[in-house]
Image: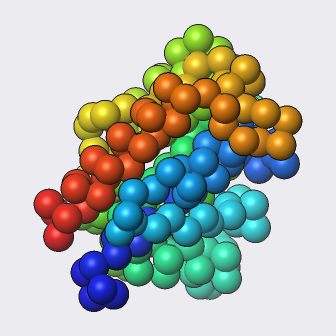
């Protein structure tokens, strides 16, 4: 790595709401990151709805910013909610914008995936849809360990602190593996 060996990850949570459990998971990941790995968070809220007519006039500034940050990062971490067994439209919309040519920035990028839901499957179905998107884009999504956080409403305090030790351990293990995944693909 060019900056003293630190692995720089761009983290994207797929929910816009203030009390998002997935945004809280991303914040927990930032705190649980192993030595030598940092996670910068990107807010997808300013990204407009995809419109090919708009793209043909140039990427809107928030999309330019997202594309530049993806390119500059050594790897990505998506923390996705599950909406109707898939990923939320806001997250798909951000990926769709970023993926447009030239030089789509997901190509060859190491990627980790996590998710928190109020249901019993911890976003498993959304995560597999997200993985499917990155087949076309040649994003290199790490296979295991997976982090699927079910009934997440019972695992976070009102201020968003992740209280559940087992979940903290799963996140830490995922991040250690993501660091190794980035270094392996370097
Ligand atoms: C439109 C919509 C669809 C949802 N579908 C699912 C679902 O398929 N599976 C599930 O476990 N939870 C589902 N939920 C509940 C989410 O798990 C819950 O709202 C969660 O807190 C969303 O993530 P966030 O806290 O990061 O915003 C759905 C919620 C919404 C708003």
Q: Position of residue 135 (x, y in %)?
A: 28, 46
> In this image, 32 relative to 103: left or right?
right
Front-lying residue, 68 or 20: 20
> In this image, 185 relative to 96: left or right?
left
For the point 31% across and 34% down, the residue is 145
Q: Look at the picture and state if 22 lies above or below 151.
A: below
Q: Examine the rendering and report whether any part of residue 85 can be seen.
A: no
> Could you tell me which quadrant the N terminus lies in?
bottom left
Instruction: Quadrant for residue 156, please give it.
Output: top right
Quarter of the rendered structure image containing ligand 1: top right
Front-lying residue, 78 or 153: 153
Front-lying residue, 129 or 179: 179
For the point 50% across and 64% down, the residue is 39
Q: Look at the picture and state if 81 lies above or below 92.
A: above
The tally of labels here is 0
Q: Position of residue 28 (x, y in %)?
A: 60, 48
Q: Position of residue 18 (x, y in %)?
A: 84, 48
Instruction: Quadrant for residue 5, please give it.
Output: bottom left
Q: Look at the picture and state if 12 lies above or below 89.
A: below
For the point 42% across and 44% down, the residue is 172
> In this image, 143 relative to 20: left or right?
left
Instruction: Quadrant for residue 102, please give it.
Output: bottom left
> In this image, 50 relative to 123: left or right?
right
For the point 26% across and 37% down, the residue is 143
Q: Which residue is outermost to the top?
A: 120
């Amino acid at each position: 790595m060019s900056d003293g060996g630190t692995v720089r990850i761009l983290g994207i949570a797929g929910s816009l709401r203030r009390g998002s459990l997935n945004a809280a998971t991303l914040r927990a990941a930032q705190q649980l990151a192993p030595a030598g790995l940092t996670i910068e968070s990107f807010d997808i809220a300013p990204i407009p709805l995809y419109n090919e007519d708009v793209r043909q006039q140039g990427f809107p500034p928030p999309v330019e910013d997202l594309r530049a940050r993806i390119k500059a990062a050594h790897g990505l971490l998506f923390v996705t909610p599950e909406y109707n067994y898939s990923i939320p439209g806001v997250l798909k919309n951000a990926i769709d914008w970023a993926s447009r040519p030239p030089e789509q920035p997901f190509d060859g990028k190491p990627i980790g995936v996590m998710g928190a839901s109020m249901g019993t499957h911890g976003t498993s179905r959304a995560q597999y849809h997200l993985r499917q998107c990155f087949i076309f884009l040649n994003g290199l999504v790490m296979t295991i360990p997976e982090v699927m956080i079910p009934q997440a409403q019972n695992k976070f305090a009102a201020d968003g602190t992740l209280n559940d030790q087992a979940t903290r351990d799963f996140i830490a293990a995922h991040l250690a593996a993501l660091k190794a995944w980035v270094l392996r693909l370097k």
